[in-house]
Amino acid sequence: MPRPRRTPSAPLLLVVALCLGACAPERSTFGPEKRRKEGRVFYLGGGSEPESIDPGKSYDGPGLDVARELFEGLTRYDPATLDPIPGLAERWEVEDEGRLYRFHLREARWSDGRPITAHDFEWSWKRVLDPQTAAQYAALFWDVVGGKAYNLGRGLREAVGVRALDDRTLEVRLERPVPWFLELTAFSPFHAVPRHAVETYGGDWTRPEHIVTSGPFHLRSWTPNYQIELVKSPTYWDRDAVWLEGAVFVVSDDNHAMLRLFRAGEIDWLGPSTRPPPEYLAHLRGKRDYQEANYLGSYFYWFNLREDRNAGAAFKDPRVRRALLLATDREALVEYVTKGGQRPADGIVPDIFFERGYPRPAPIPFDPEAARRLLAEAGYGPGGKPFPPIEILYNTHEAHRQVAEAIQAMWKRHLGIDVRIANQEWKVFMSNRLEGHFQLARAGWIGDFMDPYTFLSQFLSESEANEARWKNAEFDRLVLEATAERDPAKRYAMYARAEAILMEELPVLPIYYYSQQTLIAPWVEGFHPNARDIHPLRAIRLEEP
Amino acid sequence: MTRFLLRRLASVVPILLLVFTLSFVLMRLAPGGPFDAEKPVPPEVKRNLERQYRMREPWCEARFLPALAEGLSPDAERALRAERPWASRLERICTGAFQYAWMLGNYARGDFGPSYRYKDRSVNEFVRAGLPVTLQLGLIALGFALCIGLFAGLLAAVHHNRWQDHAAMTAALLGISIPNFVLGPILIFVFSLGLLWFPPARWEDWSHMVLPGFTLGSVYAAYIARLTRGGMLEVVRQDFVRTARAKGLPERLVILRHAIRGGLLPVVSYLGPAMAGLFTGSIVVERIFNVPGMGRYFIDAAINRDITLAMAVVVINAVFLLLANLLVDVVLGLLDPRVRYE
């Protein structure tokens, strides 16, 4: 006998409907919902111990992050767009087709009350160029007239084209137009350091008891490998715009420890140098305090094309390089292996520039059929010579291992090539890369400013960073001519032509464009995801409890 | 006693010199330099850095590879070195000898030299900031280890082969087998993120010290428990204990006044290496709990090729090991009438 079908009762439907309405909208957080700390002090992860917080000498991310808050340049970064806006210079003129900059400084004081003058800038820039300072970012100043010669020990200090016309006017002469120069002046190496403190205390001048600063914050304490404590500077020219009373950089390069501190509400933001460990990403992605954004970086493999080594003999043939690229399913790689919001790369200039009008490079398909054909043309495979075994070198890291293993499997499956993968501890790896002891080596390149030049310049023939030792005169010409072009659209078009040559010859195997992942508490305001993960603390506010 | 101490202290110097020399040679032989980075610095800048930090010695270059004086490009220098491997090797040894003498001279003045990675800092500063913290953490861990270990060991020995014994020894076995990089996160998960009793990391007041102290001390507590139990069981079977019992002393006094002196000898001799181990063992614990101590430099400094910092950590650890062993020998002599200071 058929049973009567039971219909869901009205009360049950009501419960389901209520639950759908109540449960759906608000997403939960990974850390606490409400702030557990009080006061206007911002706690953030500082990454590893800074190598130096001297703006002229710092070279590592954590050091630059602290230095950027303590000192201000002629220009500074807009917190949202990172475009250069007036900093210690209230205005400037650009003359001689971009070869001459005249900055007019505003009235501003060092934290010890002395006025900040154009002479401070002149002295500081020459200090960075001084070969004795051994500043690692000195090459950024090579475009200043006479800068390169002085830095290399072949020119005179007096010949360097930076000059204080009076206390408030600084004149800079450049060898060639540098379209991103105003962005450079916001970058720490271009910040003025207090000559009187540096000359009195030498290397100790960056200690809390000696330091004299010009930025929105001042250094209160610095405990090595533990924390760096900043307090709002009472002498900063725009102090009224700074909401925070202080900030604490919690120093640790252990991402898991930082994640736990965030979860316990001990820090408000993971910080620019700390990434959530990859195994957490799937769990974090649905949380309200998790953020993901595109990042100004490219991930790729170098082919070793050097003449002095036969390490990569098979790669000397460009058809082999193209075959390897065509057999690399980069789409699958970012979707199933890296899983952190990366995008498959069709070039070296990251996709962040596309929205600024940079022409997209021609898409590189995943085409194992064409790859096999190319390899056969080059004389390898069935009927030809066997492909010599190759080795991918990477620095010891779980994420790099996974990418290398995936590529190893793809090339084996689609091309029948035997690939060895080898990992080395960072310094050994870097030493081997620089010395040319590799066949294929992992590399990541992070841009220093918002111009494709920061990515393309490493492929210039004479660049020390060109680890393939690939040389192409047409590429060099296009890139160097582009830098003289002040119209961004035309400049981008020339860069794109140069990049097309690069992608034709393939000294590198492009893999993906970087993304950044972070955790930021819901009560933090004034935090804007941006291409370089730079977040000036002067814009940060903590929602009043 | 004084002669014994003097003789032992005198032997410390050559041992330290040996440790210093060996670690120097190992650091020099490791491939990669402190200034190798993904974004290469201008060659002239790198040369200046290397000169400032004694990785390049103009005298040695002039002697063995005079062509370097012209300021060759890195590629040209590589080619030159490949062409003349022996001259290049001699130049490296010569530079190393200069660097060795420079560092030894620094050490003689009580100066560990400048850090190769942290540009404006001296190694002394890192030692001054980190060593007290590591010692504090080590002492807390030692306190945990002794309290828990002695209690559990005595309990097990007194209740030999009863459930207290089995429970204590099972706990000890767990303590020995669970490494601190597993125990630490578990404790954090339960007591920091779950119960919110203790902070998950950092080093401010006593509440920050409980979890790392316990994590670091647990393995030692387990060893001490086993050693105490073993030592006590051996002693309680001996004649003088039987005599004490025969005199009609209460069991508590037999154990605490008579047996414990002999029963703890293995624990005391273990404390020497244990104290040194607490210093080095904090490598992991300091990272997990973000403790600003020195232990982490053991690995970090070596990875960064920060030769001065790495060597300072090794030498300081050697000093600790030597002093701890000396202390143990002295205490053993006080506890055990059979030991003589010869």
Image (cartoon, coloured by chain):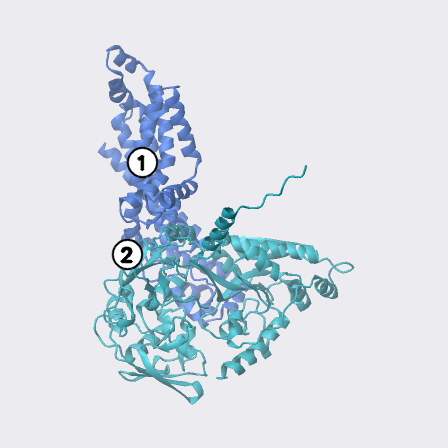
Q: Identify which amino acid the numbered label 1 is placed on.
A: Phe
Q: Taking A20 as reference, is B232 left or right?
A: left
Which of the chains is blue?
A: B
Q: Is residue A376 above or below residue B226?
A: below
Closest to the observer: B171 or A479?
B171
Which element type, helix, strand or loop, lies under badge 2?
loop
Q: Is residue B192 above or below residue A128?
A: above
Closest to the observer: A458 or B61?
A458
Q: Identify which amino acid the numbered label 2 is placed on.
A: Glu
Q: Position of residue B323 (x, y in %)?
A: 30, 39
Label 2 crowd bin: few (<14), some (14–19), many (20+), radius 10 Å: few
The residue tagged 1 is B144
Q: Position of residue B231 (x, y in %)?
A: 35, 23
Q: Is residue B342 visible?
A: no
Q: Is residue A440 above or below residue B335?
A: below
Closest to the observer: B335 or A477?
A477
- Quadrant of the frame with the C terminus of chain A: bottom left
Alpha carbons under labels 1 and 2: distance apart = 34 Å
Q: Position of residue B133 (x, y in %)?
A: 29, 47
* Colour used to depict chain A in the structure image: cyan
Q: Quadrant of residue A375?
A: bottom right
Closest to the observer: A86 or A32?
A32
Q: Residue at x 38, y 32 (%)?
A: B222
The residue tagged 2 is A38
Which element type, helix, strand or loop, lies under badge 1?
helix
Chain letter of disc 1? Answer: B
Q: Position of residue A311 (x, y in %)?
A: 61, 61
